Amino acid sequence: MTHANRTLPTPAPHNTKAKTCAFALLLLLAGLLPAKAQNAAYQAYINTYKDLAVEQMNKYGVPASITLAQGLLESGAGRSELVRKSNNHFGIKCGGTWTGPYVLKDDDARNERFRAYKSARESYEDHSLFLRNRSRYAFLFRYSPTDYKAWAHGLKKAGYATNPRYAHQLISLIQRYDLDRFDKLRGKATRPAAVAHGQIAVPGIDLTPSVHLTVRMNNDNYYVIARPGDTYESIGEQMGVSTRKLRKYNEVPRDYELQAGDIVYFEKKQKKADKAYKGKYHRVAAGESMYVIAQKYGIRLKTLYDNNDLPKDYSPQAGQLLKVR
């Protein structure tokens, strides 16, 4: 693994712009950038790879918060040399079983071999398998999937990194960026069906009694479809999101009662629909409101009105075509 607490090398004397960028990268990896710049870099990494982390959690059982925190720490928020040269987000060395490509990098010794991947997805998958298939990490999977502190200390105990503060660094990142909210998204995360003739196919209502909600994804946002008896309070309690935020994110008043079939998002909706809908239109079905359509595409209600130059009190007509992006 890569480790912190090293003396920073002096940037090579290239042109001023390159020199500035190289020095900024070194500061980021060392955690010495101004807080605003560092937070922006870290948040950008989280936004980019959160879905991969949740996907891996659902597939192999490694908490998404742990995966994201390790990715942030090991890769310097995706800007390390290992990421740029080999898509290696977790500082995993070749070891005795790796038969794939590798790159050389000084770490505990000179010219150590680090695994190289074709994509970030390959790196995330290998990280999960690295933990899942090695006996020294087996005890981690006996911990609660939401106990990120136990996982962090367990990784240090198992020898994932030599830095004595490794567990504390992971925990600090998880708490600072609220990464454990992704641990609550256990379940099947899927994207909506492909567009057909300008329409979006919405998953049907699951009326089968179940303790756990099925988590899906639409327009880079996680959501569930309310079942009979669900409320914003019950969903918020199960998913770890306050009722107030759920109502705010889904643009409903305090007195609105959740109905079976309603889509409930866990984060603020996007200003634009997914790029797959660029140049396409939604054909209004009988009884559909502007709000229902906005929810289907995971966009803010104001966006739908603005895209079509419509007043806020407008009610769409069946068969009408609406621009969603």
Image: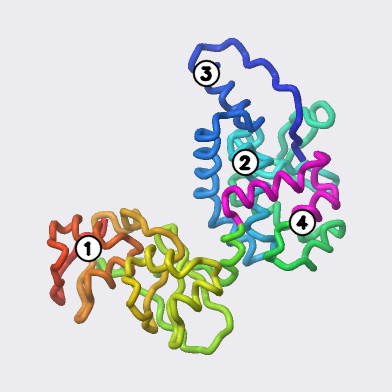
For the residues labelled 4 and 3, the Cα–Cα distance comes to 37 Å
Question: Which residue type does callout 1 highlight?
Answer: Tyr
Q: Quadrant of residue 285?
A: bottom left
User: What element does badge 1 sit on?
Assistant: strand
User: What element does badge 4 sit on?
Assistant: helix
Q: Earlier in the sequence, mark 4 or mark 3?
A: 3
Question: Which residue type does callout 3 highlight?
Answer: Ala
Location of residue 269 in the rendering, given as x and y in whole percent from the top left corner: 37, 59
Q: Which residue is mark 3?
A: 18
Q: Earlier in the sequence, mark 4 or mark 1?
A: 4
Location of residue 204 in the rendering, given as x and y in whole percent from the top left corner: 40, 81
Does 204 appear above or below 283?
below
Q: Which residue is mark 2?
A: 87
Magenta stretch bounds? 152-179
Near mark 3 (Cα within 10 A), the count class, few <14, some 14-19 or many ≥20, is few
Residue under the image location 40 percent in, 70 percent down: 193
User: What element does badge 3 sit on?
Assistant: helix
Near mark 4 (Cα within 10 A), the count class, few <14, some 14-19 or many ≥20, is some
Does 68 appear above or below 235?
above
Assess whether residue 308 is covered by the magenta stretch: no
Q: Which residue is mark 1?
A: 281
Assess whether residue 166 is covered by the magenta stretch: yes
User: Does the residue at mark 4 contact the one at mark 2 (Cβ under 8 Å)?
Assistant: no
